[in-house]
Image (spheres, rainbow, N blue to C red):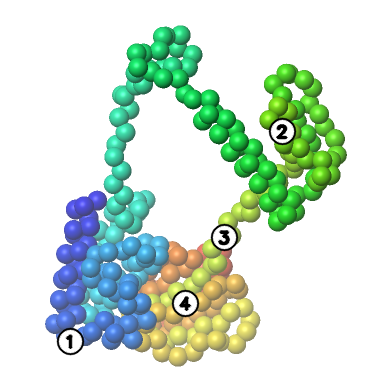
Amino acid sequence: MTERNDALKELGRQASERRESIGMTLETVFDRTKIRPEYLRGIEEGDYTGFPEIVYIKGFVRTYLKLIGAEDLQEEFMNQLDKTQGTKKQDIHEPKRDKTAKRKNNILGSGSTMPKGFKPASHFWLFLVLVAALVGTAAYVWYAVTYGGLDLKNLKLFNFNGAGGPMITGNISSDEVVLASEDLVVPVSVDEVVSEEPEPEPTPSLEIHAVNDVWLSVAFGNAQPVYRRTLKRGEVMRWDLTLPARVSFGRPTAAQVVLNGKDLGIVNPNSRRAETYIYNPDGTYRKANAR
């Protein structure tokens, strides 16, 4: 991990020297590429904390290096960035646990005598823990009823008196909830009180990076084009992809596409004619009129 970080810092330093050697400032790079200044500084300093997914990092680096004429550094950059796949973006040093360590004194259930100097736990602390549990339970019930929409009519009561008695069930009202030290009666919902909503899926997106100046025409669904002009070298355009996008490239060799976070690379490195492609929200794509 340290070697990778050192390598990225050294590559960033070399890239910074290339940029300065051609008299270009970070502000100029931002104006030409629309890459945030903090991301540009992170690339030059080898610090990728706060960056988005690795595919976007690679796209930023490619665009930046091509703008300053440092394409010869791209391969080494990509090799080092590939090492970050499956790892966190910053080193987290945690002390290793000693798996061979064993507890010297197993007090509960061991049948051994207490070692000398051992003092039994004070009952005061046990009482304090019990009080804290009761207060926490009461606070939770109050919060669930007040803000969480908890309906006490659909709750069941359980007897926790330790006597092994039968479970008590029934409908109760808000003034019948009782918390006592001997018989602890707490409401338990038949259904889940709090339902965890699934995390929303990321919005499908389409990004086009201009490797060189390239004319574009972008339309969604059957609508008229929403974008129709020349994308300058180093510029990046991004759209949320709710409908299929129909994109015409004047020079397929001059544009790089990222679909739903996946780097598709150059549109067609072997074509010298204008081509049109269809990019779908599900991540599939095809050449227009191709079957």
The amino acid sitting under disc 2 is Ala
Observer-nearest residue: 1 or 264? 1
Image quadrant assignment for residue 110? top left
Q: Which residue is mark 2?
A: 180
Give the amino acid at mark 1: Gly
Image position of 149 with respect to 239: above or below: above
**What residue is rendered at 47% in x and 17% in y?**
108
Q: Earlier in the sequence, mark 2 or mark 3?
A: 2
Q: Check if mark 3's residue and mark 4's residue have beta carbons within 8 Å.
A: no
| Corner quadrant of residue 64 | bottom left
Camera-near label (2 vs 3) is: 2
Q: Which residue does the numbered mark 1 point to in the structure image?
A: 23
Q: Which mark is residue 201?
A: 3
Residue 257 in view of the camera? yes
Query: Earlier along the polypeptide chain: callout 1 or callout 4?
Result: 1
The location of residue 94, given as percent across then percent down, is 31, 43
Question: Can residue 254 be seen in the rendering of this structure?
Answer: no
Disc 1 versus disc 4: distance between alpha carbons?
29 Å
* Residue 45 at x, y percent in the picture: 23, 68
Label 1 environment density (alpha carbons within 10 Å; few <14, some 14–19, many ≥20)? few
Disc marking residue 102: none
Q: Residues within 10 Å of mark 3 (few under 14, many from 20)?
A: few
Q: CA distance from mark 3 to mark 4?
A: 18 Å
Q: For numbered disc 4, what is the local secondary structure?
A: strand
Q: Could you tell which of marks 1 and 3 lies nearer the N-terminus?
A: 1
Above or below residue 151? Residue 220 is below
Horizontally, is 217 left or right of 153 in the view? left
Which residue is depicted at the point 43% across and 64% down? Answer: 262
